[in-house]
Amino acid sequence: MTHAGTNAIPSPSRRASRGRTPSGRPNPIDEHVGGRVRLRRTLLGMSQEKLGEALGLTFQQVQKYERGANRIGASRLYDLARVLDVPVSYFFEEMGDAVQAASPRHMVRATEDPPETVDNLLAQRETLELVRAYYRIPDAGVRRHVHDLAVALGPNGGAA
């Protein structure tokens, strides 16, 4: 049996609850923390399955954490930091002002979603794969040439 209104699209004047935005989307801070988990996991070359095994979770739960769909509790964040070999503060680094302003204490009275933020280029799969491939180049001179090539191919040929 379904409850009336459970499938209804939330009205723009709905209040945020449980740290989510008024529309029910995950809180931008939870998305940021999840993105940092994904970034570190990917840079380590670790699959979601391996991370899940190390934490006693399924890969689906890891996916939900990485998307921000499920909030990461303090004890789980501590375990993530240990498994990923980073300080807990790592998960909050590079958080923009707009994301910080979406903390649950601010969202509790919000009736509109916070503005969309620009996607973090470092969290994109292509960027992570490129960085990992770059650092697998054993010769430092060759790495420097690859770097110089990438800079030269960018807008203005790398000119400031």
Image: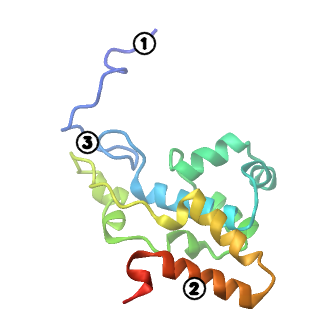
Judged from the image, the secondary structure of the residue bearing numbered disc 3 is loop
Can see residue 74? no
Judged from the image, the secondary structure of the residue bearing numbered disc 2 is helix
| x and y percentages locating residue 98 in the rendered image | 31, 65
Which quadrant of the structure image shows residue 6?
top left
The CA distance from mark 1 to mark 3 is 22 Å
Q: How is the image coloured?
A: rainbow
Residue for point 40% across, 56% down: 28
Which residue in the structure is indicated by mark 2? Answer: 148
Counting other residues with Cα less than 10 Å from the Cα at mark 1, is it few (<14), some (14-19), or many (20 or more)?
few
Which residue in the structure is indicated by mark 3? Answer: 15
Q: Is residue 122 above or below residue 107?
A: below
Identified by mark 2, the residue type is: Asp
Along the polypeptide, which appears first: circle 2 or circle 1? 1
Can see residue 133? yes
The mark found on residue 100 in the picture is none
Residue for point 51% across, 81% down: 151
Q: Is residue 87 above or below residue 78?
A: below
Which quadrant of the structure image shows residue 128?
bottom right
Along the polypeptide, which appears first: circle 2 or circle 3? 3
